[in-house]
Image (tube, coloured by chain):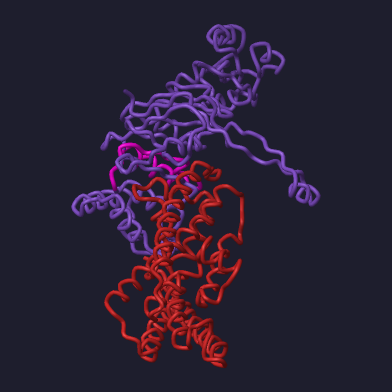
Amino acid sequence: MSLISVKNLKKYYKVYKKEPGLWGSIKSLWHREYEEVKAVDDVSFEIEQGEIVGFIGQNGAGKTTTLKVLSGLLFPTGGSVSVLGFNPWERKPEFQKQFALVMGQKNQLWWDLPAMESFLLNKAIYEVPDAQFKKTLDKLVTLLDVKDVLNIQVRKLSLGQRMKCELIAALLHSPKVLFLDEPTIGLDVVMQKVLRDFIRDYNKEFGATIILTSHYMDDVKELCKRAIIIDHGHKIFDGKLQDIIDTYARNKIISVVLSEKVSREKLEKFGELKSYEDPQATLLVPRKKAAEVAGRMIAELPVEDVNIEEPPIEAIIREVFQTGKTTG
Amino acid sequence: MNLMVMLEYRADFLFWGFVSVMWTAFNFFFTGIIVGSSGFLAGWNTDEVFVLLSIFTIYDAFTWSFFYFNMQRYMNKVFTGELDMFLVKPVDPQFMLSVEHNSYNNLFRLFIGIGMLIISLIHLNKPITLFSFLIFVIMFVLGFILTYSVWFMFATISFWVDRLDNLNDVMPSLRRLSQLPRSVYSGVSSFLFCMVLPVVLVTSIPAEALVHKISPLWNLYYTVFTLVIFWVSRRFFYYSIKKYSSAGS
């Protein structure tokens, strides 16, 4: 049986639609129109132990809602969910001691006290033995290099330092399952890299199962072999990250360096001309014809160098959302 | 933890102390004026009323310390989605919500209340048996449980409505009714505040144990009512939590 199993998960909300302006506010006192929002609609997937899975989706796609259902925060409208063999909604302490939820935009640390106090509180809540607490804390503090800030009020820490302390607070009980919701949001590129490396190391060392949502494709590309794409509450892709390219990329990019100037019209005969600054031109051509088109270009144009490559994954995913493609 | 937070801001702590002392002193002063002219209030003499008022002061200091801010924060957490962090931890969320933020700003009032209770009892000069003291302690604790349960139910309504800012002020408004003995109330007000929502009893019943006015039937009713309402408040919380929608990230 999979470590995480989600079958036909549904989470619907009723939201009230207010007409704009003062009159709309007054009218809303006696009459309100409600609309059902399907935040997650019939989503199913299985995750095995030790996997790092990236949840990809636009804002409001249902990623965070899914994580919250998996954490037992939200009561599902329909379907069944099992995490570590538990029904998350029952919120049994034996289950809660084995997972952690880290939300980049919410903090669990006490704002007015040093992070160390929150660590000690978590130690008590999760009933972490003294020796294990010390060992884990030392390790995490060294890995994330925050020894000097543990005794400073949290509100005086930088966003990066705070996020590192949030991670430590969440990992002190050595969870087997980790739900990371935008853990790198707002961080600079250096700090993003530090956190990514840390998450990878944690996964390797503890064999932890991790679900990660992020708007930064670099997070997903560097950490996850598998991705689940969610759009408007529906799962539209579940598979290897590389397969997204094979499934959705319609074109390949051909870049050529020319030894002589060629007219734009002539280049446009070979494909969609994306850019042309003599002597370099970039074209989009249908994937299946890429090799043949490149061959023709070499034969018919004064080509000095040619390169065929896949479009960046960000561009493919953007296209997926724009076209609204779905797959089983 | 809260004590540590509070001591970080000691000027705020001391000023709170000053305000609390003044507020309590005025309360005793005005009650003294009301009772003082006749010497009796609905069958209670001045010392007996002061015993009740002392119990009210202790009770009030406790409720402000332990309930007001926690309930306010509880409702805010439901509204803002901060409840998330309470629901993922392996500890009873109702317990966490109820003890998360204790304010010690009313410590001064607590000491004044205890001091006034001792002085009033000495002045009253009625012997206190171990039995009456035990009844007092049990009934006093039940008063907290009752207040807590009803207040918690009001706060739990926040799962069902988008926002009700004044919800947290319902119980503080009602608590003023318990500054006077229950015999002051009659007719509809007695039925409402001694039977339906017995906020008046939270001070009257423990005070009656100390001033030799104990009524077994009322004690029994009060005990059963409190335990039932505590159970109901827990059931209501776990039922309402299904309505929790968190907040967008």
Compared across the picture, whether B166 is left or right of B233 comes to right
Rendering coords of residue B162 (x, y %): 61, 49
Q: Residue at x 45, y 78 (%)?
A: B57
Rendering coords of residue A30 (x, y %): 75, 47
Q: Quadrant of the N terminus of chain B?
A: bottom left
Q: Is residue B185 visible?
A: yes
Rendering coords of residue B194 (x, y %): 51, 66
Q: Which chain is red?
A: B
Q: Which chain is purple?
A: A
Q: Is residue A161 visible?
A: no
- Is residue A194 inside the magenta stretch? yes
Magenta-tinted stretch: A173-202
Q: Residue at x 49, y 59 (%)?
A: B150
- Is residue A279 inside the magenta stretch? no
Instruction: Determine whether B198 is above or below B60 in the image.
Output: above
- Farthest right residue in view: A23
Pick the front one: A118 or B207: B207
